[in-house]
Image (spheres, grey):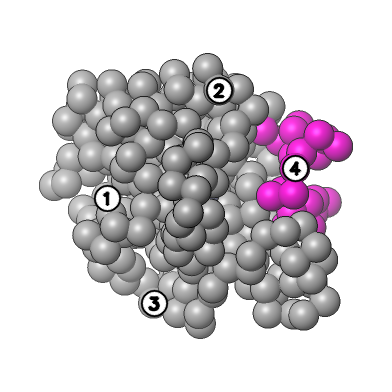
Amino acid sequence: MSTEVSRLHVLLCGFEILEKTVSTRDRGGRFILAEPVSAYLLETARGHVLVDAGLNSALVHDPTLREEHYTKRGIRPPVILPEHELAYQLEQIGVRPEDVSHVILTHMHLDHAGNLGMFRHARISVQRAEHAYAFSPDRGPAWFECDYDLPDLRWDLVEGDWEAMPGLEVVLTRGHTPGHQSVIVALKETGSVVLVGDAGDLAENFTDEVLPGESVDDEAALASIRRLKQIARERGAELLLGHDPQLIQKVRLAPESYA
Ligand SMILES: [Zn+2]
């Protein structure tokens, strides 16, 4: 297998406290889950690549900002402990934020774009449709403009499927949001893994083909779930679900890694 990716680190960035129906449409209405928030750091021949940027803890820890971003919008503030901080985790694996040359966003919801301000020097790849929607008045409460409306961010607006380098492919998996994308990583020892993003939060979304709680296009969201299952089948790849509370316990978390 030809790949320029040498290592994958899974970064656990905190826990969101939410109704299960946020992840599984019309299913599990009685339950509240503590869902992990994940981001990923890749070591590659072309430098360090971050996939998603976690949560902005300042918006949780400052009472005024918390009120404005969470309480007023009817969103429970997430739990972000010191060991969940992105900067701390990068430090644990010996990487400085300025070492990250490329950020790939699966989408721009609050739990995926939280620390973009740390990566103003990096290229930030996101689907053009996602970027446009994030700045449109139609977006819902889960979009925190203050995290991504920063004048000096170096946006790289992509469209459709694309390849960042051999062993690092990105596929359009729209539906949950207008320009959601998922990342396929080829590793020499581990094989292929798919960083699903929020195309499906829980294993159940894939095994039972359950729609995410929120989608801008249900048909596309279902097609994306099926497409990722097919990719996993064809390549013998593992689906890495960033929000699944059970699966996260089986994952090797940073500072450990996959090669
Ligand atoms: Zn999410």
> For mark 2, what is the residue?
218
Check contact, mark 4 vs mark 1: CB within 8 A.
no
First-in-chain label (1 vs 3): 1
Within 8 Å of ligand 1, the CB of disc 1? no
Kind of residue at badge 4: Gly
The residues colored magenta run 130-151
Residue at (50%, 36%) from the top-left corner? 25
In this view, the mark in front (2 or 3): 2
> For mark 3, what is the residue?
92
> For mark 1, what is the residue?
6
Residue at (74%, 54%) from the top-left corner? 144
Q: State the mark number for residue 140.
A: 4
First-in-chain label (2 vs 3): 3
Give the answer, above or below, for where 5 lies relative to 119.
above
Q: Which sits in the foreground, 96 or 62?
A: 62
Q: Which sits in the foreground, 243 or 210?
A: 210
Q: Position of residue 189 (x, y in %)?
A: 13, 47
Kind of residue at badge 1: Ser
